[in-house]
Image: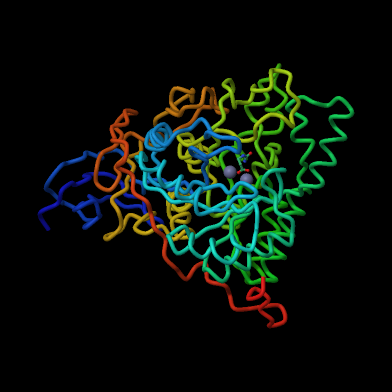
Amino acid sequence: MAGFDMVVRGGTVVTNSEVFAADIGVTDGRITAIGVGLSGGQEVDATGLLVLPGGVDTHCHIEQLQDGGGADEESWTTGSTACLAGGTTSVVTFSTQFKGGGILEPLAEYRRRAASAMVDYSFHQIITDATDSVIWDEIPKVVESGVRSLKVFLTYDALALDDRAYLRVLAAARRAGALVTVHCENHDAIGWRTEALLAAGHTAPKFHAWSRPRMIEREATHRAIALAEMVDQPIQVFHVSCSEVAEEIARARHRGLKVWGETCPQYVVLTAGDMDRPGFEGAKFMCSPAPRNPADQLALWQDIRRGTLDIISSDHSGWCYDGTRGKRAHGSDANFRDIPNGVPGLAARLPIIFSEGVVGGHIDLPHFARLIAGNPAKLFGLPGKGAIAPGYDADLVLWDPTKKTTLTNAHMQHAIDYTPYEGLEVTGWPTTTIRRGTVVMRDGKVQAEPGTGRFLARGPYDMIRPTGTLPDGFDASVFA
Ligand code: URP
Ligand code: ZN
Ligand code: ZN
């Protein structure tokens, strides 16, 4: 077949199920052929390299608006640069509702801001205030506009839903045909422990982990699943930190429920001990749920291998260490309650998971492709994404599987002034990123134009349809 715009030649192609030597032909930004001896158009030499699907990061915070004005410190241009540097070509980030407000207006503002994106993108709509107008009027409109996932928090003062409000969102999602993603931690238990810790003078970053031990995450996950089961609404549990939380998901799956689990690089390479580094350094590792311990890291790999956790996202958070909104915004002796949660990791995701997972012997190459691209694209219904196959977008990463790198913040190419992975040695590195048939990163140099990213409108799809099984046959969701 002739007439390709681009041929990626001589690489080892890694699909979601196979590994084989082949060339890839690209026409009009799509993959049109996979075979040997292809030629035509721009030639990209992949000799000695793996050819992976472009990374799909379905949980990252980019240019997220803050109550009181402004946005977090990662803009669409810096965030996209970091993504492309690290081999990620599509993201699903967030549109936030502030309590007392609606969701249509903020979503319009997020769409406007994302006009400078250089990666393809969609949003999860965060629901913090389940008012009648949001539930009955605005959620259906948001979903109809192609934003087919809602995010709810079971903790954080400004964001948490109580169980009744969570049920209302589940029911609204069921009616509209959206997936619900859930941050599972028990808000009241965290509040109680936090007050006790602070009263005892335990204020340092390491006490962040003490304020939210694993049973707080497990309990909330169990509850989130039970309530979703009652409504028969599919959910994804975000950022699972340890195996006993994954067990809740495995049990739900065993009962035939549509419940999926995500974990993140921070839970396989960071530990609670990192929050105990000297001075205020521990703040750099603070995220929620909190990183656990080395035994948990090993157990998580088992959950990944079994498929209980089938997506690895970055949960990139745009907080600097210094800076007006950063970790040190309240000073270097701030108590842990006043330190923003979250760690940056857009560009680190693929290198860490490849190095720890594939090179570390926990997963094979197709499993890696599914975790970082295939599964997230499928679960979130991202059209044309997540696979190397004819008809899919030509989002490809050329990957040197043997290159050793000691991570520094300069590799990350984000707006954040630190990386929690500073000094971590990884094997495997992206050398070229191709987005819809255009080379957008070569040898670390990102060469995309702001505004070339596309909004990914997500229509209905089978994977997130309710199972049709209600506990007693009564569908309460029509009255929510
Ligand atoms: O600590 C975290 N994960 N911060 C980001 C917001 C969230 O909870 O996902
Ligand atoms: Zn969360
Ligand atoms: Zn998050």
- Residue 118 rendering spot, x and y as whole percentages: 34, 40
Q: Which color scheme is applied? A: rainbow
Does 423 sit above or below residue 87?
A: above
- Residue 186 rendering spot, x and y as whole percentages: 76, 49
- Residue 56 rendering spot, x and y as whole percentages: 43, 48
Quadrant of ligand 3: it is top right
Of 186 and 299, which appears nearest the observer? 186
- Place residue 86 in its image quadrant: top left
Image quadrant in which the C terminus is located: bottom right
The reply, left or right, for residue 93 in relation to residue 35 is right
Residue drawn at (48%, 63%), measured in percent from left and top? 141
Total of numbered circles in the picture? 0
Residue drawn at (84%, 29%), measured in percent from left and top? 198
Please, which residue is most extreme toward the bottom here?
A: 473
Of 284 and 35, which appears nearest the observer? 284
Does 207 sit above or below residue 47?
A: above
The reply, left or right, for residue 401 in relation to residue 313 is left
Of 18 and 289, which appears nearest the observer? 289
- Place residue 448 in its image quadrant: top left
- Residue 229 rendering spot, x and y as whole percentages: 68, 69
Residue drawn at (88%, 29%), measured in percent from left and top? 199
Q: Is residue 208 visible?
A: yes
